[in-house]
């Protein structure tokens, strides 16, 4: 995932960053009361880094844990900090796994070169 560097992001940027369709983002806004990006007078949505983190947690609940929208809303409402810690731990484990796989590939290529 891309790092968050700006203060505000358009929906198209968030969609690209998190690989989530804009229609899904708009739907999640309706279902998750905490997810309310600011809007211009013209209706353009702007997401903050905090909004993007909320979306990542929602994405984790729905896409990775496989929860239905109602269950994800309930989980998010009941324990957002617990979900955040679990999500962060899983992301760190994925990073470690990727580094270990890279080391294994390097080791195997060194062995093959003997």
Image: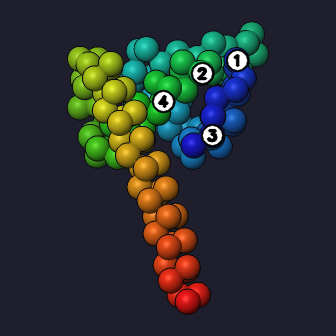
Return the residue found at the far top. 41
Q: Is residue 5 above or below residue 41?
A: below
Return the residue found at the far right. 42
Q: Is residue 1 above or below residue 71?
A: below
Mark 4, other Cα within 10 Å: few <14 / some 14–19 / many ≥20? many
Residue to which mark 4 is pinned = 55
Instruction: Name the image quarter holding the C terminus.
Output: bottom right
How far apart marks 3 and 2 lie (CA) works out to 12 Å
Q: Is residue 14 left or right of residue 42?
A: left
Q: Earlier in the sequence, mark 3 or mark 4?
A: 3
Q: Earlier in the sequence, mark 4 or mark 1?
A: 1
Q: Is residue 106 above or below residue 36?
A: below
Mark 2, other Cα within 10 Å: few <14 / some 14–19 / many ≥20? some
Residue at 38%, 46% (x, y): give it: 93
x, y percentage for residue 18? Answer: 56, 41
SS at badge 3: loop
Q: Are marks 2 and 4 in contact (CB under 8 Å)?
A: no
How far apart marks 1 and 2 lie (CA) works out to 7 Å
Residue to which mark 3 is pinned = 2
Mark 3, other Cα within 10 Å: few <14 / some 14–19 / many ≥20? few
Total marks shown come to: 4
Q: Earlier in the sequence, mark 3 or mark 1?
A: 3
How far apart marks 3 and 1 lie (CA) works out to 14 Å
Residue 7 — which label?
1
Residue to which mark 2 is pinned = 49
x, y percentage for residue 90? Answer: 36, 41
Residue at 28%, 46% (x, y): give it: 66
Q: Earlier in the sequence, mark 2 or mark 4?
A: 2
Residue at 36%, 26% (x, y): give it: 84
How far apart marks 3 and 4 lie (CA) works out to 14 Å
Q: Which of 6 and 107 lies nearest the eye of the viewer?
A: 107
Q: Earlier in the sequence, mark 1 or mark 2?
A: 1
């Amino acid at each position: 995932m891309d790092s968050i560097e700006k203060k505000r992001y358009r929906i198209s940027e968030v969609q690209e960053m998190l690989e989530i369709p804009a229609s899904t983002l708009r739907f999640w806004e309706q279902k998750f009361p905490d997810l309310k990006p600011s809007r211009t007078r013209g209706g353009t949505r702007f997401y903050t880094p905090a909004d993007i983190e909320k979306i990542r947690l929602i994405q984790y609940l729905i896409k990775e844990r496989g929860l239905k929208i109602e269950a994800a809303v309930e989980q998010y409402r009941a324990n957002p900090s617990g979900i955040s810690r679990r999500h962060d731990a899983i992301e760190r484990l994925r990073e470690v796994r990727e580094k270990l796989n890279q080391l294994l590939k390097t080791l195997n290529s060194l062995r093959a070169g003997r």
